[in-house]
Image: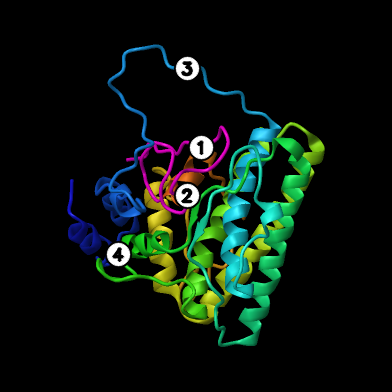
Amino acid sequence: MFGKQTVTDMISRSTTNEADRRSFLRAAGLAGLGVVGTAALSGIPGTAAAHTPPAAPAIGDPEVLNFALNLEYLEAEFYLRAVYGRGLDSNLIDGTTPAGPVRGGREVRFSSRAIANYAREIANDELAHVKFLRAALGSAKVSRPKINLQESFTAAARAAGLIGSRDTFDPYKNEDNFLLAAYIFEDVGVTAYKGAAPLISNKTYLEAAAGILAVEAYHAGIVRTSLYAKGQYDAVRKISNVRDAVDGTSDDDQGIGNAWRSNLVPADRNAIAFSRTTGAVLNVVYLTPKAAKKGGFYPDGVNGVINMSEDNA
């Protein structure tokens, strides 16, 4: 509908009307900026076939936990590479299908000891989450999907207007870039676990998921506070706008405020965090407002039966 330069111009507009900017992002077909590798999302279902659609797969606790495991694989790979210069060990990536490779990622040269310590703690937590979910799922666990930590961040940064249409964004270049990249994940993780809670029937699993949600919320608070201390209000707001543009019509996502007033806890008027459906979560990590089975950080999609984003275009 619009060219990439037009989209970039829209994103770079004055921010006096947030709802207008986000609706423009949706109308501009943001999916074109989020596709990594090929020029189109080949996983989008066709509409020409005239037949009875197959029955939706049954969604139970294993399917929900495997969906969460896909997200934890992504977070663990991102943080482990930033802190230790390497990802998950080979004994932590196998599953019901062959494991996918990870593209990108390297050790960050942090400029402050505090941020380096935060990153190390978060990396170790995400590693523990992967181990816990894999153990809970046993032989039903999915393998690590193919993950892109390189072009995906550039696509997201271009869509947000953080960089130009021909520039690249390296999340491992410095600690500011690292924090902005981490912000993309952490808020989404919180809303993902909250949204998935009603889908879990086993109380033991539900309690564990609630515990992981709490840890992800601590992580998000650390990242948001660190970015606020660095005065990264505008960059964070732009990322928030992109997330809101792809995940549906509601205006729920929130930045960190401004120099005069902080907004470190993204909650509603009752101080309750909002939820994302599994489809809306995939809209964000696939970097598309359309129904798709792959894209963005997951070039071949996530593993498991919960793998389709929503049609919010």
Classify mark 3: residues with Cα within 10 Å, few (<14), some (14-19) or many (20+). few
Scheme of image coloration: rainbow
Q: Residue at x 47, y 49 (%)?
A: 298
Q: Residue at x 64, y 34 (%)?
A: 63
> Residue 298 has which mark?
2
Magenta-drawn stretch, dominant element (helix, strand or loop): loop
Amino acid found under the numbered disc labelled 4: Thr
Q: CA distance from mark 3 to mark 2?
A: 24 Å
Q: Are marks 3 and 4 in contact (CB under 8 Å)?
A: no
Q: CA distance from mark 3 to mark 4?
A: 45 Å
> Residue 307 has which mark?
1
- Decide if residue 157 is on the left or right side of residue 77: left
Q: Are marks 3 and 1 in contact (CB under 8 Å)?
A: no
Amino acid found under the numbered disc labelled 2: Tyr
- Asked if 104 appears above or below 199 in the picture, the reply is below
> Residue 156 has which mark?
none
Say whether residue 156 is visible: yes
**Residue at the spot of label 3:** 54
Percent position of residue 19, x then y: 33, 53
Amino acid found under the numbered disc labelled 3: Pro
